[in-house]
Image (tube, helix red, strand yellow):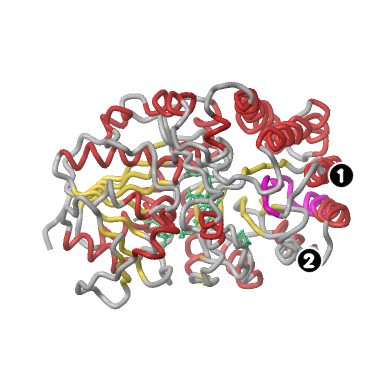
Amino acid sequence: MRRLHVTILDLVTKGPTDSLYARVMNHNLASIMPQVVGVWCEELGHQVRFICYTGREDLQQELLEETDILIIGAFTRAALTAYAISHMFRARGVVTVLGGPHARSYPQDSAKYFDYVLGFTDKALIKDILSECAPNRPMGLHLQAARQPTELPGVKERWKFIEPTIAKAPIPFQIVPMIGSMGCPYTCGFCVDANVDYQPLSFDQISEDLKFILTKMKRPIVAWHDPNFGVRFQDYMQAIETAIPPGRIDFIAESTLSILTEPHLERMKLNGFRAILPGVESWYDMGGKSKTGQKKGEEKVKKVADHINMILRYIPYVQVNFVLGMDCDQGPEPFELTKKFLDAAPGAFPAFSLLTAYGQSAPYNLTLQQDGRVLPFPFHFLDNNHAMNVRPIHYEWPEFYDYVIDISEHAFSWPMIAKRFMRNRGMIPKWYNFVRAVSTGGFGRINYHKRIRERLDTKSGIRPFMEGETTELPDFYRRKIQRKLGPLWEMLPPGAVMHDHKAYLHSQSTIMPLSRDSPPAIVEAAV
Ligand code: B12
Ligand code: SF4
């Protein structure tokens, strides 16, 4: 096989930024898979150049070097940035590949702008693409492994890509990304992992990686990227306990309340867990996940608040995730319940997400598209905050935004910020929550939601767009994209700003398997 110049670009943001939060935190949004793909490409004998774009690098400069194939990892919010870069490279004769959440959610749209679009990715698939490395135009190929890979290169192999990425951040915020499992045993219909079986990776490798990290960093922090950390709790804790002395590494993880029982928390505390992000999502659904069983509404609020307060006795930083606008919510009650929860558990940082249907990533999105409830908001705004691309079933938009603003103002009012500050233990949780609340995570979002709310009552064109009466993008949104993309705006391929918001539904009738020789592990579909 020809030795290729492979450029790998992990897009953690969509355009230049110099904000304080971005400087401190953006590199911590780096993904594991681009690093994994980098290791695989090198193992296959190719030359790799790796760039993690955090919004502060000069992309034009970084992307100048010789490249035969460009592999981009992107979330949907950075899709337009990825499209523009791919367009630029294809014009130079480079073959382009897209992987990551956007490729999984919107393969049909991505295939218009990339030669290869990847779903589940393993080494065999990367090998296949590199040996072919051919332009596929006008429509790229959508390829995916039959299942999630059963093994991934560990921290030691990925270190050459991790080190320069985390070096961009100030020392107390240099976080190493690790993963010990994929998929999830739960089946939340709005989640990308609803139909993906839970599968642990090697626990021996986890132990080896932890030992390795201690040889490289004095006081390491590890963030687990497992969709639901701790499902095989005993194995995880054993892997940590046998590898490193108690508390030598600080850990951050996303987990469900049902896993976070008191005996588990005791052990997690001993092992150095310092931050945990459980999801409550809604007061009416997800009983199994939050271990509230049949309890709903007020009863669930009390139970969850008690649970969160108990977690806070063991773990100093807790972020609770809520999804706003779910179908089970109706009237003021869910928002009032959330306020009661915040009052009862003021130490937790609340993260509110607007319900978002990311293309074909979740089974429920098909129903939403069938019911005509999905809106064609450009990808740029699909980050759970800047737009809600699902029309709520029980709310009018102005009413919904009034509730969103009200709950956010409650969560980030000065008395709540003060209470949170007093309840949090340790300087880092106290100040981190304070900064988040008064910057983009709190005040910034309230201001943004208010600007949308005001425009719902004017002739800005936003209301008809959000009612699904027109697909013409209001100027407000177009200008925002243009401003953020800067010079990349000019590089966007024609028509790229908008997409077929019903592509998942349409693909149900049009998918035709392509007959092409491929290794058995690879499933292929024309898009
Ligand atoms: C861990 C996690 C995070 C972590 C780590 C993020 C990261 N960079 O990986 C943190 C907390 C930082 C995070 C942040 C965000 N997240 Co997040 N996150 C997840 C979570 C829980 C697990 C993802 C994961 O790592 N899985 C394990 C990997 C190995 O599996 P995989 O993702 O399926 O990837 C496979 C393929 O897609 C492919 N692949 C993946 N990446 C790449 C890259 C390349 C180059 C290639 C070739 C292949 C490839 O290979 C993998 C193996 O088959 C998912 C939900 C879930 N249950 O999956 C949400 C999820 C990915 N996040 C989501 C969102 C929206 C966000 C945020 C925008 C939230 C916010 N408002 O801040 C940010 C964006 C961060 C960014 N980099 O831009 C959405 C993405 C939807 C979309 N289409 O964009 C998801 C799907 C949740 C949801 N709402 O449905 N997240
Ligand atoms: S528990 Fe979390 S990761 Fe698992 S299916 Fe539900 S939302 Fe997805």
Amino acid type, residue under disc 1 in the picture: Ala
The quarter of the image holding the C terminus is bottom left
Please tell me whether mark 2 sits on a helix, a strand or a loop.
helix
Q: Position of residue 280 (x, y in %)?
A: 72, 53
Q: Is residue 517 magenta?
A: no
The quarter of the image holding the N terminus is bottom left
User: Residue placed at 42% from the left, 35% from the top?
Assistant: 14
Q: Quadrant of residue 456?
A: top right
Distance between the Cα atoms at labels 2 and 1?
23 Å
User: Residue placed at 54% from the left, 26% from the top?
Assistant: 20
Q: Position of residue 476 (x, y in %)?
A: 49, 24
Residue found farthest to the bottom: 520
Q: Is residue 36 left or right of residue 372?
A: left
Amino acid type, residue under disc 2 in the picture: Pro
Which of these two is toward me, 427 or 526? 526
User: Residue placed at 73% from the left, 59% from the top?
Assistant: 285
Q: Bounds of the magenta span?
A: 308-327
Q: Is residue 512 left or right of residue 25?
A: left
Q: Which mark is residue 263?
A: 2
Residue 432, visible in the rendered structure: yes
Residue found farthest to the front: 469
In this rendering, the answer to whether 388 lies above or below 59 is below
Which of these two is toward me, 340 or 180? 340
- Mark 1 burial class by Cα count in 10 Å: few <14, some 14-19, many 20+: some
Q: Which mark is residue 344?
A: 1
Q: Position of residue 124 (x, y in %)?
A: 29, 69
